[in-house]
Image (tube, rainbow, N blue to C red):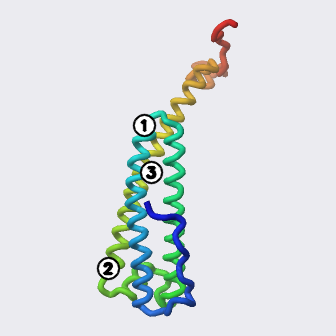
Amino acid sequence: MATWPRPAAPASTDVAATPATLRAHLSQLLCEEGALLSQLESLLERETQVLRGNDAAAIEQIGATRQECTSALSRLAGERELACRQLAPPDRGGDTELIFNWCDPGGGLVTRWRGNLTAARRCRDLNERNGAIVTLKLNHVQSLLGALRGMRDEPDYGPRAVRQSLVTSRELGAA
């Protein structure tokens, strides 16, 4: 895993606004972002396995680690946007690919950027899958709690549009 939090980026006054300087800075940021996305993807795969089990401590731990990783990715994205806004020529209008092409006509930054976008989509899909697992587990727990409380899975109204009671009394045992 990468070290979080990441050291602060140089201030715009410390970096000359030249294409080569911006390219170097963006290249470093995109490399770090790619590494973090790779780590997040692996983490989300492990999270899937943990979620399929019933180890609450492991679920909590992996959730905290995932949060650290996503926070680091957010910081990198913010730093990248700030560098583009402060160091790129104003005529680029904040368009990431235009800025990348301005400071790196060879296209290496755009290629790395697109690779990171692809990795981010994979992470999003894994995260959505994990969210679906969590939703299923929560629905199952709600169903079990409803059974313990004597709630039925019937609609509020019966066939004659008469309101039905949702709570019934059930003796669970005697002391």
Q: Are marks 3 and 1 in contact (CB under 8 Å)?
A: no
Task: Provide the residue designation for mark 3.
Answer: 127
Q: Amino acid at mark 1?
A: Arg
Disc 1 marks which residue?
Answer: 52
Position in image of residue 26 (x %, y %): 43, 79
Element assignment for label 1: helix
Compute the Cα span from label 3 to label 1.
Answer: 14 Å
Q: Quadrant of the N terminus?
A: bottom left
On the picture, is 110 further left or further right than 13? left
Q: Residue at x 44, y 86 (%)?
A: 22
x then y, percent, for residue 20: 40, 90
Q: Depth-wise, is mark 3 or mark 1 nearer the camera?
A: 1
The numbered dot on residue 25 is none
Local SS, label 2:
helix
Say if residue 41 shows up in the picture.
yes
> Which of disc 1 and disc 2 is earlier in sequence?
1
Q: Amino acid at mark 2?
A: Gly
Dot 1 crowding, Cα within 10 Å, few <14, some 14–19, many 20+: few
